[in-house]
Image (tube, helix red, strand yellow):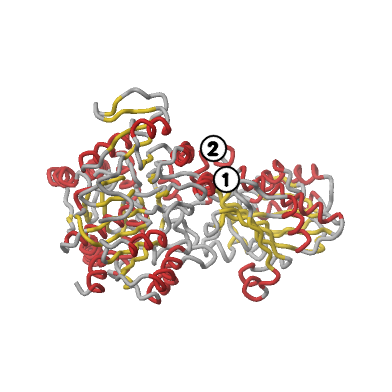
Amino acid sequence: MNIHEYQAKELFTQYGVATPKGQAADSAAEALEAAKALGTNDLVVKAQVHAGGRGKGTFKNGFQGGVHLADSPEKAQELASQMIGQVLVTHQTGEEGKLVRKVLIAESVDIAEEYYFAILMDRATERPSIIASSEGGVDIEEVAASHPEKIFKEAVHPALGLQQFQARKLASQLGFKGAQIRAASKLFMAMYELFISCDCSMVEVNPLVLTKDGDVLALDAKFNFDDNALYRHPAIAAMRDPEEEDPREVEASKFDLNYIGLDGNIGCMVNGAGLAMSTMDIIKHSGGDPANFLDVGGGASEDQVKEAFRILCGDPKVEAILVNIFGGIMQCDVIAQGIINAAKTVDLNIPLIVRLEGTNVEQGRALLNESGLALITAEDLGDAARKAVEAVNNAA
Amino acid sequence: MAVLVDKNTRLLVQGITGKSGSFHTQQCMEYGTNVVAGVTPGRGGESFEGKVPVFDTVKEARDKTECNATMIFVPPAFAADSILEAIDAGIELVVAITEGIPVMDMMRVKAAACHSNSVLIGPNCPGIITPGACKIGIMPGYIHKPGKIGVISRSGTLTYEAVWQLSSHGHGQSTCIGIGGDPIHGMTHQQAAQLFTEDPDTEAFILIGEIGGTEEEEAAAWIKDNCDKPVAAFIAGATAPPGRRMGHAGAIISGGKGTAEAKKEALQDAGIAVSESPSDMGATLLKHMGA
């Protein structure tokens, strides 16, 4: 799950991570109020979308750039009016761009130096790892390749957490001096506390800056949260912005289905992530194109199967549906009943290919046979993929 | 005749009275697994299906029944605690089936497990089975048959797929280990490969990986230096878009790392036969064995 910059700022403030003051606004009038409340004429107005490259983006109304400096609250208001309600296209949004619903009004700061600072859960060492660099505001992968000596890493003990000395060591390695070392290490400690407390899988501060006044501030951050842990963070779960996500995925998530939209025309319903990925692979291998990744999960109910089926049928791109189930914890008769229930409520006018195997397979097959549904049965995974690709090609 | 589990395994089930827990305990018992105890806090003194005593704590179950393996079906919010409880009681083999445990919880569990004598399999896994002897987990028993081929996999249903292909070709399995799809989990591909390499009754094995992480590469490097048995592999997710988590929390290509291509290359470099299609996993191994 991703969050907006203004929400990241809220988390910073809550955990004591130093960051410039700012507030979100969803109208030009609110932008004016927010700007006045900051009590300064050094302002920045930033479009709030889940995509990078905002500064260099272009609005579809021709307005250039999703990040602008303003020298008065009135100027901030005018800039906000050009952005809110407009569609911003950046190198990360694709051609269709993203609708800007909110802007962030923040104090602008005079930057002396930029740095890179990230904390991530490192699966290789099975502990949090901090990665920092004196080369900020650039592609960190590039720095790692060209100047590995400018990348500093610190592994954190799972039980001890980040120690003061580690934070000071990082600050010193990044080149902070005197009182800045204390300010930087304080920020690192607060950032680690945020990372652990909020069950983040990654926090990337980009950029971390030293201002000309000598302050160390986190300007913006990219957060990734562990979806498995959202149940214990209702406030963070509430930061989710469904408008920023694929509507098919939003719909699927309401029913706890693992769905990822893709661009092909063969809709897939599979149990198990590995088998779902492999089903995508084998469709491609057989010359077809999957419309989605959909894992109905371990213990899906009839209702979940029904909803999954409804989502697939509701996607105009889908020209055939491939159901591939190898029942373990998932029972084939449950899947079969879900399909039958769904077929009663949606008008199924595209080919449906079904391959069932595993727990309660006989009951599942019997249910499908007795249902009178027009479906194509498949012997195995390879057969199912071939038949699905064939069905789409015949229809074309 | 197999690795980790056999006829002598005495199984405890944590979360035995839950919906999934009770269904799959029943299935394991029907398969012939010796289920000796269950644990559900607050339900001590009851009996599961009139056959299996239920205890409040793992320690009590261990003391009274000498269980030496546990299967965990506890919901994700409480599962880490259950794994730690099993480790504390000294259970030799801990198989965590639960899907959806927060990664921070697993980080702490893993740090504790390293200093114990327990072997952890999972979480988010189908379990482990030695066909004809002992089934611990949610895999459908009937697809397996006893034999000499080992199976290691990060994915549940994909394991069944491989097993089905082997059984359909008339080749049984020594043991099948589902190591799980989470980023931080117990037994690794490499550790499982080591067990099969050392097991005199395993002639060859299949390694099923997926995108994300570097475990497959590490296993490949180990196999290259230490294993003379024929090995086949399949990597799921060759067509997955980068940056999207493919169901398993562990299956994600990030920062250009963990791609199917890099894994296949490492495996091939180790002399492992890599199957391009998931429908050819069994056939690829059998061809490689000259069977």
Disc 1 vs disc 2: Cβ atoms closer than 8 Å? yes
Q: How crowded is mark 2: few (under 14 residues within 10 Å), some or many (20 or more)?
A: few
Helix, strand or loop at mark 1: loop
- Residue bearing the label numbered 2: A232
Asked if A174 appears above or below B19 in the picture, the reply is below
Amino acid beneath label 2: Arg
Query: What is the chain identity of the residue bearing mark 1?
Result: A
Q: Which residue is drawn at 49% across and 47% down?
A: B116
Q: Does the rendering let one see residue A276?
A: yes
Place of residue B275 in the rendered image (x, y in percent of width and height, measured from the top left)? 30, 70
Q: Quadrant of the C terminus of chain B?
A: bottom left
Q: How crowded is mark 1: few (under 14 residues within 10 Å), some or many (20 or more)?
A: many
Helix, strand or loop at mark 2: helix
Q: Does the rendering let one see residue A265?
A: no
Place of residue B77 in the rendered image (x, y in percent of width and height, measured from the top left)? 48, 37
Asked if A312 appears above or below A207 in the picture, the reply is above
Along the line of sight, which residue is nearer the eye, B131 or A288? B131
Place of residue A45 in the rendered image (x, y in percent of width and height, measured from the top left)? 72, 54
- Residue bearing the label numbered 1: A199
User: What is the spatial separation of the Cα atoms under label 1 and label 2, in whole angstroms?
Assistant: 9 Å
